Image (cartoon, rainbow, N blue to C red):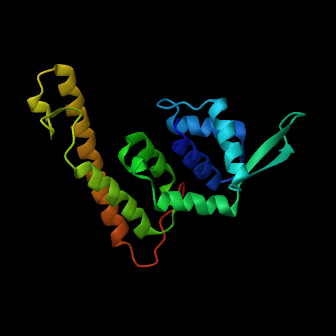
Amino acid sequence: MASGDLTLSILGLLGRGSMHGYELKTRIHGLSGHLRPVSDGALYPAIARLEKKGFVERHEEEGAGAARRQVLTLTEAGRRELLRRLREPADLDISDQTRFFGLLAFLSQLRDREAQARVLRRRLAFLETPASFFYEDGRPLRAEEVGDPFHRGMLVVARAMSAAEREWLREAVAELESAPAGARPERPGRA
């Protein structure tokens, strides 16, 4: 998992509540482990960097057995950094599908509907820009123009996924924009 992905995942998960390192690793794996697994060799140094920056604090608590466990908590500075990353995601967080889904996993923590809509509009603009995996003379090729059946398959699947995502993005932006002024988005897990 890339450093930026991991930082956002740590901040976003701790933004929901304190947890110990193993629980954090399990939840990160649940979000994207099948695509980009996170190792202890990446996670714990990332946590240490966030502690050094003052974004995360660590304290000990009684464990289920005799051993005490280290519990991680997001600081106020960490919450500000999380909200900054959600409000102003890097270009790669918008263009890379997995990183964008990671961003979506925590976007509800950004309580400003207009800021949420801005992020979604950036992704929509990216998806509406003509692109392809394959080009001819600088022009993106469509599935119908590609002879290789596997390349064509890549383009057909990507086109279908992009169409579905664009439809959802338009609906989500319209919903965010139609909310009454001052309305707050629902929190995850609440009806």
- Name of the residue lying farthest toward the front: 137
Q: Let me know if residue 109 appears in the view.
A: no
Query: Is 149 drawn above or below residue 123 in the view shown?
Result: above
On the image, which quarter does residue 41 sit in?
Answer: top right
Please give left or right for residue 100 compared with residue 9 in the image: left
* Image height of 138 relative to 18, above or below: above
Q: Nearer the viewer, residue 13 or 96?
A: 96
| Residue furthest out toward the left | 145
User: Residue 127: x percent and y percent?
Assistant: 27, 49
Quadrant of residue 45 in the image?
A: top right
Residue 30, above or below 115: above
Compared across the picture, whether 29 is left or right of 167 comes to right
Give percent across and percent down for residue 129.
Answer: 22, 50
Instruction: Kindly indicate the quadrant of the structure image that contains residue 79.
Output: bottom right
Q: Residue at x 42, y 63 (%)?
A: 116
Left or right: 175 in relation to 107: left
Q: Is residue 149 above or below residue 97?
A: above
Q: Residue 170 at what x, y percent from top left?
A: 28, 58
Place of residue 37 in the rendered image (x, y in percent of width and height, measured from the top left)? 54, 30
**Extreme-bottom residue of the structure:** 181
The residue drawn where x is 64% and y is 37% is: 43
Q: Nearer the viewer, residue 53 or 179?
A: 53
Q: How many marks?
A: 0
Q: Give left or right: position of 179 versus 19.
A: left
Whether residue 122 is visible, yes or no, is yes
Residue found at x 17% / y 27%? 152
